[in-house]
């Protein structure tokens, strides 16, 4: 990984580059004099000497510095665009700038509940309106693609069954319809409807239009295996990379993404030897060209609400009350921030520089000219060794190994600025049960066949179970109980040894004895054996949800997808599960 080099920066700054000025506009404010005598106004009389002394201290007049004020800054920034995206453990694909990175990493296949079937059918019947005899064509489609309960994803409860009785005569099995449109079987089926060539062509085109419309409603992976979710870790893992002819590939990995919003702090630079992303289709990506753009600008002082005013006859804003800051002896971060705001806030300048989204940028150099004519070439403040914790650095990525020279580049992630989340379709609570020496996954919310979330306990109570036979009469004072029971929406995870280790354990999904214990959530779906790393279920537990996400991208397009979230739980729990119990026999059972 290349680092900032003073000689290279100085050489580049001496090139005959054109630094276009970035001056937006100037406004001049002039006062309206109301008197001809300014003697008293120029005296700037002060009644409070202590206040005057504090203002002098604030201006730094008690600490002289032979330094000039910056009047011009010239900078050059090297910008590398993203070229690759790869889910963890998979080959890469071309980065899609028309998608937010959250969408690409989180999106899953669309849930085909009854609402999805009904909405898609309604749109399709609008497409084929006026094709031949409308009633006959609809009847042919309803006969060819009948909607049955097994075609509906989610829990088919009483409400879903009642709705299905009505929908079965009006709604198509759109999952089968879309699958046949993609495979070409839909056109063969249309040929068997006995329509004219013109009407058959219109139905075939309507099928292709339906496919395109459905794809525009919900962002889904092209390949169902293209999933960044890792069940063993209960988090997303993926990587992006730049690829330029000058620097080669720079791989950025996000191995612990769960919070629902991506930014620079979610990524680490993969500095392992041979770190490289390869296209899964075997093609070779054409490296891009690094864009180096110079800029000349007049540095502007940094400002924030409530900061100390640089002019002693001007009163500060009351938006921030520094005198009301309640800092304890352990609030070091708060004290440092307060000292920075009060003492050093006026020492910072800002140079606005617009960067394209989805790029890794590096400041080649900043050449600052002050009012004394002195020019200074500024180095990145966060340079040096990556493991030197004393260095001051912001908005820079860490190296995965934590060693070597620090990477001072900035990654402007193609992330959504604001997100709308629907109520979860699924919610699973993972927690530890120390008394039972295991962990549990409780389905608190399960998906309904109508497209909403249902209470997991309610669904568990509705599951048919054979009646428990009454215990036989006995004259003994106690009765032996082999084991107690838990609700049907509780699923155990038992500790098992990691292969090749006698000490490390992992959590394996198990099941309680008895019929009717069905898993309804995609969060717990998966073929056996189903493992979760032990450290992924801490003492505080973990809550994982799955639901619809919606946002608007920079090109104005609306993005909708199904994603997952993992947040910290509320602590340990107890199932009450116990074995080999001796219970007192009630008097009526003797």
Image: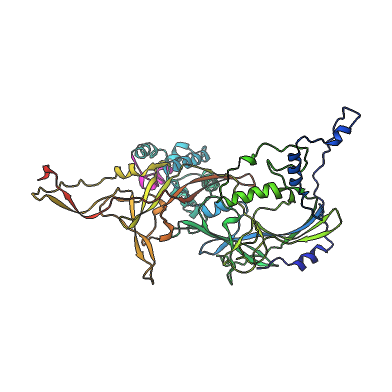
Residue lying at the far top of the rendered structure = 34
Looking at the picture, tell me which residue is in the foreground, 272 or 288. Answer: 272
The stretch drawn in magenta includes residue 156: yes
Q: Position of residue 100 (x, y in %)?
A: 59, 51
Quadrant for the C terminus, please. top left
Q: In this figure, what is the number of numbered marks?
A: 0
Can residue 87 be seen? yes
The stretch drawn in magenta includes residue 415: no
Can residue 99 be seen? no
- As drawn, 587 above or below 526: above
Q: Position of residue 326 (x, y in %)?
A: 58, 43
Left or right: residue 463 versus residue 75 is left
Quadrant for the N terminus, please. bottom right
Q: Residue at x 67, y 36 (%)?
A: 318
Residue 401 position by quadrant: bottom right
Q: Position of residue 87 (x, y in %)?
A: 53, 60
Residue 10 position by quadrant: bottom right
């Amino acid at each position: 990984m290349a680092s900032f080099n003073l000689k290279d920066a100085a050489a580049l700054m001496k090139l005959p580059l054109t630094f276009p000025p970035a001056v937006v506009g100037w406004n001049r404010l002039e006062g309206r004099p109301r008197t001809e005598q300014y003697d008293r106004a120029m005296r700037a009389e002060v009644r409070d000497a202590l206040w005057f002394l504090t203002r002098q201290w604030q201006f730094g007049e008690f600490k002289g510095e032979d330094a000039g004020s910056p009047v011009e800054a010239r900078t050059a920034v090297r910008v590398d665009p993203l070229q690759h995206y790869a889910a963890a453990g998979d080959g890469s694909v071309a980065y899609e700038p028309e998608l937010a990175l959250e969408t690409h990493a989180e999106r899953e296949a669309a849930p085909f509940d009854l609402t999805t079937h009904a909405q898609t059918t309604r749109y399709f019947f609008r497409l084929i309106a006026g094709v031949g005899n409308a009633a006959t064509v609809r009847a042919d489609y309803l006969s060819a693609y009948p909607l049955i309960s097994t075609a509906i994803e989610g829990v088919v409860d009483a409400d879903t069954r009642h709705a299905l009785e009505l929908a079965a005569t009006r709604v198509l099995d759109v999952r089968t319809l879309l699958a046949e449109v993609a495979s070409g079987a839909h056109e063969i089926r249309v040929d068997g409807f006995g329509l004219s060539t013109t009407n058959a062509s219109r139905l075939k085109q309507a099928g292709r239009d339906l496919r395109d419309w459905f794809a525009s409603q919900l962002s889904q992976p092209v390949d169902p295996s293209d999933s960044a979710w890792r069940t063993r870790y209960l988090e997303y893992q993926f990587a992006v990379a730049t690829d330029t002819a000058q620097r080669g590939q720079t791989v950025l990995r996000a191995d612990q993404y769960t919070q629902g919003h991506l930014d620079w702090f979610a990524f680490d630079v993969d500095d392992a030897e041979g770190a490289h992303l390869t296209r899964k289709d075997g093609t070779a990506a054409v490296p891009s060209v690094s864009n180096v753009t110079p800029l000349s600008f007049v540095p502007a002082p940094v400002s924030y609400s409530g900061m100390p005013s640089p002019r002693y006859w001007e009163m500060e804003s009351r938006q921030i009350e520094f005198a009301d800051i309640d800092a304890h002896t352990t609030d070091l971060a708060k004290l440092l921030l307060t000292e920075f705001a009060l003492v050093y806030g006026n020492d910072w300048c800002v140079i606005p520089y617009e960067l394209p989204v989805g790029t890794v940028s590096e400041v080649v150099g900043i050449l600052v000219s002050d009012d004394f004519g002195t020019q200074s070439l500024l180095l990145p403040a966060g340079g040096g060794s990556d493991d030197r914790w004393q260095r001051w650095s912001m908005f820079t990525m860490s190296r995965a190994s934590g060693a070597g020279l620090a990477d001072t580049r900035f990654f402007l992630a193609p992330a959504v600025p604001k997100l709308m989340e629907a109520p979860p379709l699924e919610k699973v609570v993972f927690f530890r049960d120390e008394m039972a020496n295991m962990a549990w996954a409780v389905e608190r919310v399960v998906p309904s066949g109508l497209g909403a979330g249902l209470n997991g306990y309610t669904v568990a109570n509705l599951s048919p179970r054979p009646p428990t036979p009454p215990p036989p009469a006995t004259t003994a004072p106690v009765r032996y109980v082999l084991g107690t029971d838990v609700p049907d929406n509780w699923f155990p995870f038992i500790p098992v040894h990691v292969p090749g280790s006698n000490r490390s354990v992992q959590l394996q999904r198990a099941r309680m004895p008895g019929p009717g214990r069905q898993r309804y959530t995609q969060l717990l779906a998966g073929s056996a054996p189903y493992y979760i790393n032990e450290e992924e279920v801490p003492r505080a537990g973990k809550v994982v949800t799955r639901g619809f996400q919606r946002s608007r991208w920079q090109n104005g397009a609306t993005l909708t997808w199904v994603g997952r979230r993992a947040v910290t739980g509320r602590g340990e729990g107890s199932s009450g599960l116990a074995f080999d119990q001796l219970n007192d026999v009630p008097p009526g059972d003797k």
